[in-house]
Amino acid sequence: MTTNDNAAGSNSQLMEENLAKIEALSERLIKVVSGKPAANPAISAPNQELFANAVSSYWKAMMDNPAKVFEHQTAFWGKSVKHYVEAQQVLAKGKLEAPADSFTKDRRFSNPLWNTNPYFNYVKQQYLINAEAISQAVEDVEDLEPIEKTRLRYFSQQIIDMMAPTNFLGTNPDALEKAVATEGQSLLDGLENLVSDLEANEGELIVKLADEKAFQLGENIATTPGKVIYRNDMIELIQYAPTTDTVHETPIIMFPPWINKFYILDLKKQNSLIKWITEQGYTLFVVSWINPDASYADVGLERYIEDGYLASIREVKEITNQKQVNCIGYCIAGTTLSLTLSLLKKRGDKSIKSATFFTALTDFSDQGEFTPFLQNDFIDGIEDEVNKKGYLQSYIMARTFSFLRSNDLVYTPAIKSYMMGEAPPAFDLLFWNGDGANLPGKMAVQYLRGLCQRNEFAEGGFELMGETLNLKDVDVPLCSIACETDHIAAWKNCYRGVQQMGSRSKTFIVTQSGHIAGIVNPPSRDKYGHYTNEDLSLDPEKWLEEAEFTNGSWWPRWESWLKKRSGKQVPARNPGDSTHPELCDAPGTYVKLNARG
């Protein structure tokens, strides 16, 4: 038997094995897709009425001003024909190359073949011409309310992003090159990744962002030493071990958001804010929230305040024998810390000495990039969803955040996993990002309707726990840190909320970068700087224009502010006391509860 015969036999056997794998994967794919629960159209697809109104407005414009519409159509067809002719002219010269490309660079088209290969260049340029035409058509729609125009702009951009040639195997040179180089193994691996992701999420297509087996909570992530010293059905309260001989007498309670897990602030030793705070000589307590299931359907913001904030304050005061505590609230937990401060003022309770807010919105008058999701049709869909299930599944919120940056957070990971067949990376931040938490049904609707949609806390009062809570009642010394490029809690909106608070001692800091990287910004990295300006009477643009920029992390500046409000030095406190025995090691048990149960 010749060498060629052996090679042919080997290739034939490999092909048979791959065909068998494809058949098995196809069966799994059919099974998981056929068993997928029906989607709620209100939260899974753009509103049909919105597009109907847009089409109606476009046709009305055509009737009222046909010359304008004709001009746009002519420009589109003119660019398309010109593009086609240029490609043909180059090919007519006998050269397999692309014509001159005047479009600006886009990371999606970084492969040189997009510029040099006539086929891929033609596809890219036509896509960009089409995208420009769609965007222009949306901008020219005139008879829509501003909110509806914003929504139309968002959903049309989603269509543009979705239809990018990079998202399809036949027009993605990176995927095709790898398929050839691996003799198709990358496509087989990609199909395996796709089926596995669908099976792991009950048929929902959620791309696995990180290698989940690479991290173990308490072992190689969230490792700062501490003990759970209190637990109820809403929280585990962690007291972290001291790292200094003495500490400031006033303890700190950190309230992280319950949309995600608290260990974003304790990923690893090098960037752990939790570890850094203990190293500065503070007694630090951190709340770890329960990951709710259907049994928490009737849990509202009242329970988060009563059994989360007020319970933590009560227990920490008892453990440390202090009358006051300093509090930190991150994102939605910062919003709720503001509600708690208003409630305590109504009750005449001065337990909170100072408050620090991380990327916390309290004035929702400008809904920003969340405008498409804060209208009645979408929130009606959310209400219907939580009425059926009792809670809002974590992937719904995660998907909403991801589609605000769909190219980076949806399509690029999908291309790498499903087309390129790449295994997800062992990346701690992405591991945390994929470890989401559910929201109780009642709480989700209260937050979306009363705070986000109607802006009651800043405008008129938010009714809760027998009181009318107002933003102006937040009157303790406060420091608010917002992030310059935050697309979840825009810094200008955070600033407007702080302006309305009643405190006579307010500090506002804007750090470079976004919602996570701006906060998790240790001094050792010396990566992102920050802005400060004591004049909070200015509008946001003027405030930033006149602000002083400082290189490096905001952490030391904030700690200098905090220690002035933290009292004298006392002997370091070990976790717990005689009435608060150690229940388990940090990071506790609640943080390990998976959103899927």
Image (cartoon, helix red, strand yellow):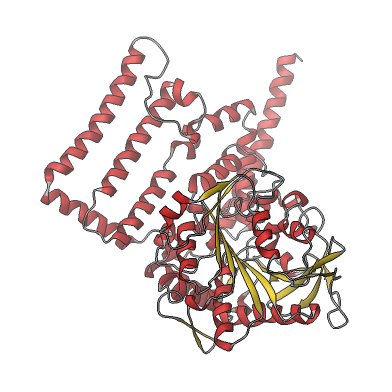
Evaluate whether residue 296 shows in this view: yes
Quadrant of res 146: bottom left
Tell me the residue at 62%/55% (across/down). Answer: 519
Relative to residue 569, is residue 310 depicted above or below? below
Tell me the residue at 49%/44% (across/down). Answer: 407
Q: How many marks?
A: 0
Tell me the residue at 78%/72% (across/down). Answer: 249
Viewport quadrant of the N terminus:
top right
Quadrant of res 322: bottom right
Q: Position of residue 280 (x, y in %)?
A: 77, 59
Q: Position of residue 108 (x, y in %)?
A: 49, 35
Q: Position of residue 346 (x, y in %)?
A: 54, 86
Evaluate whether residue 241 shows in this view: no
> Is residue 76 or residue 222 the one in the foreground?
222
Q: Position of residue 282 (x, y in %)?
A: 77, 65
Viewport quadrant of the C terminus:
bottom right
> Is residue 171 or residue 410 the one in the foreground?
410
Relative to residue 562, is residue 58 depicted above or below? above
**In this picture, residue 126 sits left or right of residue 461:** left
Relative to residue 242, is residue 14 depicted above or below? above
**In this picture, residue 285 sits left or right of residue 457:** right
Tell me the residue at 71%/67% (across/down). Answer: 593
